[in-house]
Amino acid sequence: MEAPSIWFLRANLLFFIFTTTSSSLFDSISQFQSISDGKTLVSSGGKFELGFFSPGTSKNRYLGIWYKKIPVKTVVWVANGCNPINDSSGLLSISSTGNLVLLGKNRSVVWSTTSVKQPQNPLLRLLDSGNLVLKDENDGNQESYLWQSFDYPCDTLLPYMKLGWNLRTGHKWSLSAWKNPDDPCPGNFTYGIELRPHKYSEGYIRQGNDKFYRTGPWNGLRFSGSPELRNNPLYDFHFVDDDNEVSYMYTLKNESLISRLALNQTTSTRERYVWIAADQTWEQYISVPRDYCDKYGLCGANGKCIIGQNPVCECLEGFKPRSQENWNTMDWSQGCKRDLPLSCQEKHRHGFIKYVGLKLPDTTNSWVDNSINLEECRAKCLNNCSCMAYTNSDIRGKGNGCVLWFDDLVDIRLIPDGGQDLYIRMPAVQPERKTEIGAYDKVKTAGITVAVMGAVVSGMLILGYCISRLRTTASKEKIMINEIVSQNNGGRKEDLDLPLFDISTMATATNKFSMENKLGEGGFGPVYRGMLKDGQEIAVKRLSERSGQGINEFKNELVILFAKLQHRNLVKLLGCCIHGEEKMLVYEYMPNKSLDSFIFDPKQSKQLEWWQRFQIICGISRGLLYLHHDSRLRIIHRDLKASNILLDKEMNPKISDFGMARTLLGDQTEGYTNRVVGTYGYMAPEYAYNGKFSIKSDVFSFGVLMLEIISGKRSTGFHHQNDGVTLIGYAWTMMQEGRPFELIDECLRNSSQNLSEVLRCIHTSLLCVQQCPVDRPSMSSVVMMLAGEVALVQPKPPAFFMESNGYFEADYSSSKHLSSSTNDITITILEAR
């Protein structure tokens, strides 16, 4: 009979052999086991898997963790990111000291952990949270870990993973993006919480040592510059600031949902993704920087950024540009200085201007006292000559706590729907007003009171007039408009004050809709040029009685009117006219007609030099960014093309024709439709095939439009002259063969131009037309790409749309689309879903 000890050793040996040669059946290994290349650990619930992998096109081997049930391998953590193994010799085990050791060729140590305490019975386990933990099995505390991967994040933040600092140990939790999709070694693009001496911390994304994006400080509800952190159906967020740690973490409301936050070095963005099981794809939920104003310190010291305004930067009240000459050229880096300097001798005569809805300034030079109220905070700031501004440190309830800023105020932007109040110090005498203000706030309050009273009286008179007018002339029309807009606005009933024109005004303005005033005709109906009595030129779209889709376009455009879009790169909708069966929309008039009348016309195209084309591209991108991210409603245009870009007298581009547009509510970024509408040659593949529209389908259309502006060739019909290859396919081929400049319009090739700028535009356009929506950049990224502010990654193959692939074999019903000089066709595809 064998001794018990020998039997025990043999049993352990058999168990070791079984676990190291079988496939993934376990979530843990002990000190007597190991994981070799080809073998994996799987968490108990089957959510995550640990093993060896090769990223992208690389043949190097890395130890990492990825989602088990997702077919698109998405790695969330890597052990040896900067020290790859170049063969299949990798072996992970627990050393005799109780630490993890990753061995490579010739059993050299590639990566290891360090634990202060040596366990008696070490066990390595992969949890269903994605956390890889090393613990002592003899320790009864299930959450007592000797080491855990959550303490060493890579490029991805998972639920329950922390960002911030352990103040007891000095350990920092932060993210570092991969250098590129083939190399998981941390690059110079990082995200973390930065500590302040007085504990008023905030999050920063950095490129190297330079600040790239700032979240704003935590105000009790959210980071002040992060309006996306609000109640939502996906996740909750938590911020801790005590003697033990300063940290941020999010948790999922539905554990069956899969969501991750990741840094992307190639696009210079921090992105939140949600896994859409039905589509088997990652869908981008939120991305920052959101827009141009999110660029750190864009407007310099004491400047304020307002997206949608042109220019976006302005000095704070009581300040002026340090260099007016540079400011006029849109170089705001030097910032602003005070009109009048602050005098310390008169500090008690100073006052404060209250700003509402701001992202609070950089907190580097700030001081916090959470025990005092706002009045005490004001007195403390007033008593200190160096104090520049103050506000509450916690805005919950009626507000509490005090934060003071010293030195210049940097990186301020307007956030109307989620910003915070800020009180900025002003001298005793205000420039222009020359008002002595022992207490400037009181003077300002009195002025505001007078203004408000005047506005109320004026408003009452105007309201009385409007009510009388509407009751007598347009009550039925207004009720109808309200119903239309509420139906297209999530069912919310609102009493809307929409501009209404009477039929006689329209008839007079257009010379009774004469043929001489007719500009063109499309699916909606004819369009007429007109002039109001005050001399304003207008364009009137008159719904045709024969129009099959015009009434839907009319309703859509009323919703856009209700949204009150205000941007220099959007055509302004002035109002509407409803009289019996007559339905009209009134726009500002664009004297240079549409973009297609220039770029596709042999004579006109020669008048459009490259610098003008580039300004048009940039203008369209800013207008689209406003629609997607900064307007009252998130708007997907769905029919972006050259004929829908109108040009004013200075050749500034304006996006027009929102008849096909769809609006999204809240944080929604996509939708589906049974009625696919749009223009052949511009539609994204996921929209054309499945009716899925999103901000990324608009990005696709913008990419096609860019190629048209660069080449002077129509996307529609291009394949007929080029053996079935589309304009997108031609551009991709030219780029791959190193001949991208052959894509440039012939009339530009011999003229002086910025070739690197042209190449950047071609490259950006190919990123926009990539097959998969997730791969396409957001419009905020596109704007920065065009400005040369971010590095361009290698685009993946685009949607070629060869004629033979069946894309053009769908049963389309078509109608001619409004344009002054185009043969583009807007198509409507009805499919059962």
Image (cartoon, helix red, strand yellow):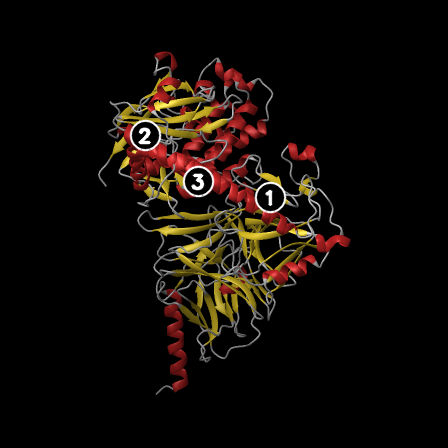
Q: Secondary structure at mark 3?
A: helix
Numbered badge on residue 738: none
Which disc is residue 304 wearing?
A: 1
The N terminus - image quarter: bottom left
Residue 219, x across and y down, in percent: 54, 59
Locate residue 84 relative to residue 581 in the image: left or right. Answer: right
Mark 3 Cα-neighbour bin, 10 Å: few <14, some 14–19, many ≥20: few
Query: Camera-side residue: 732 or 288?
Result: 288
Q: Amino acid at mark 3?
A: Met
**Of the residues shown, which amino acid type is indicated by label 2?**
Thr
Q: Which mark is residue 460?
A: 3
Which is nearer the eye, 176 or 319?
A: 319
Precedes in sequence: disc 3 or disc 1: 1
Query: Which residue sits furthest left?
Result: 832
Q: Earlier in the sequence, mark 2 or mark 1?
A: 1
- In the picture of the structure, the residue carrying the numbered disc 2 is 473
Q: Which corner quadrant of the image does residue 677 belong to?
A: top left
Spatial CA distance of label 3 from label 1 is 34 Å
Query: Is 594 placed above or below 421 here?
Result: above
Q: Position of residue 7 (x, y in %)?
A: 38, 82
Residue drawn at (23%, 41%) of the image? 833
Q: Residues within 10 Å of mark 1 (few under 14, many from 20)?
A: many
Number of callouts in the render?
3
- Residue 711 drawn above or below residue 129: above
Q: Amino acid at mark 1?
A: Lys
Q: Left or right: where does residue 316 sit relative to residue 642?
A: right
**Residue 433 percent coordinates (x, y):** 67, 41
Q: Earlier in the sequence, mark 3 or mark 2?
A: 3
